[in-house]
Amino acid sequence: MIEFMAVTVRYQEALDPALIGATLTVQRGALTAVVGPNGSGKTTLIRALLGRVAIADGRILLDGTELSRLERVEVAKRVAVVVQREEPAFAMNVGEYVALGRHPHLGTWSRLRDDDRVVRSAVDSAGVGALVGRKTDALSGGEWQRVRIARALAQDGATLVLDEPTTFLDIAHEMEMFELLARLAAEGRAVLVVSHQLNLVARFAQHVVLLHRGRVAAAGTPDEVMDARTLEAIYEWPLVVARDPAMGAPTLIPLRRRS
């Protein structure tokens, strides 16, 4: 479980904080989604979790322990992060790439004996068994995303964090990605997804956090957060919220502006 408790982050070159008193909890067994317009602070949350930006105020807890008190290798054993953009410096075998997820455990002999089993399980869970013999530079966008998730699963942590995992994916691969994340959450992991895809989030997430200008503007179930007035004011675009005829989930429909 991850807890952001009144977290504030300031970038040195910026006039305003990127995050202001942000509070949210990522529970095990659930898919939690963070949404919001560009510049609302979504990626800053991930950077704060990774320790890439300093926290000016507040705390981040991992399973009840303050993140700043944990060694980074210990955090890596518990939390796997799939960042928005990543390209290996050189092409490598997919199986070897997935096995990189075992790196945080290299110093533990008892873990080393389990590496092959954990990697095979990660490959199976992500559905990339057919790709193991291929090179990373020969993968499609959807295949590459699944391979990256397999590497994260090979870390064998209880928490999975993903920043815009459906970027550049087509409709089928977007659905496959969220189906996979929902299944991983149902298996007991804590899954945090940063996404622009509000309609997919509404279908799959149990908890949604809406950020606006660094603050939490709304939080709750998709029904509670997907309010037309709130979303229209935050995204500054006319819209309506209807019902997904297949799933019954709230669905955002952007409208054309009248000339």
Image (tube, helix red, strand yellow):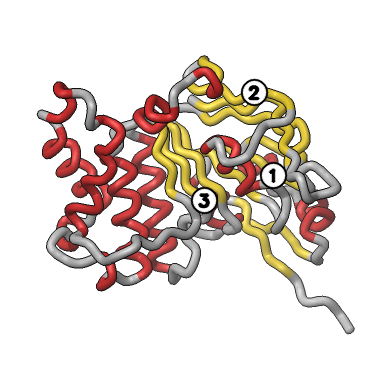
Cα–Cα span, label 3 and label 1: 15 Å
Determine the residue positioned at 79% across, 42% down: 17
Q: Which comes sooner in the sequence, label 3 or label 1? A: 3
Picture coordinates of residue 89, whole percent (x, y): 34, 62
Q: Is residue 257 left or right of residue 96?
A: right
Sequence order check, earlier mark of 2 and 3: 2
Depth check: give the residue in front, 13 or 185: 13
In the rendered image, residue 192, in percent from the top left (x then y), is placed at 50, 40
Give the residue type at disc 2: Arg
Depth check: 37 or 55 in front? 55
Asked which quadrant contains residue 146, the reply is bottom left
Is 136 drawn above or below residue 164 in the view shown? below
In the image, is 15 to the left or to the right of 77? Answer: right
Picture residue at 72% right of the left edge, 37% below the top: 9
Using the image as rendered, state which of residue 252 and residue 237 is in the foreground. 237
Which residue is painted at 26% across and 45% down in the image?
A: 100
Pointer 2 or 1: first along the chain: 2
Q: Which residue is mark 1?
A: 210
Q: Quadrant of residue 5?
A: top right
How many residues crowd around disc 3 within 10 Å: few (fewer than 14), some, or many (20 or more)?
many
Q: Is residue 42 above or below residue 171?
A: above
Q: Quadrant of the C terminus?
A: bottom right
Residue designated by label 3? 163
**What amino acid type should be assigned to the residue bearing mark 3?**
Asp
The correct choice, above or below, for 74 with respect to 238 in the image is above
Q: x%, y% of residue 91?
A: 26, 66
Instruction: Name the disc covering residue 257, or none.
Output: none
Q: Is residue 62 left or right of residue 240?
A: left
According to the picture, the residue beneath numbered tag 2 turns out to be: 59
Of all residues shown, which one is farthest toward the bottom?
259
Q: Is residue 141 left or right of residue 202?
A: left
- Label 2, label 1: how many angstroms apart (C-alpha)? 19 Å
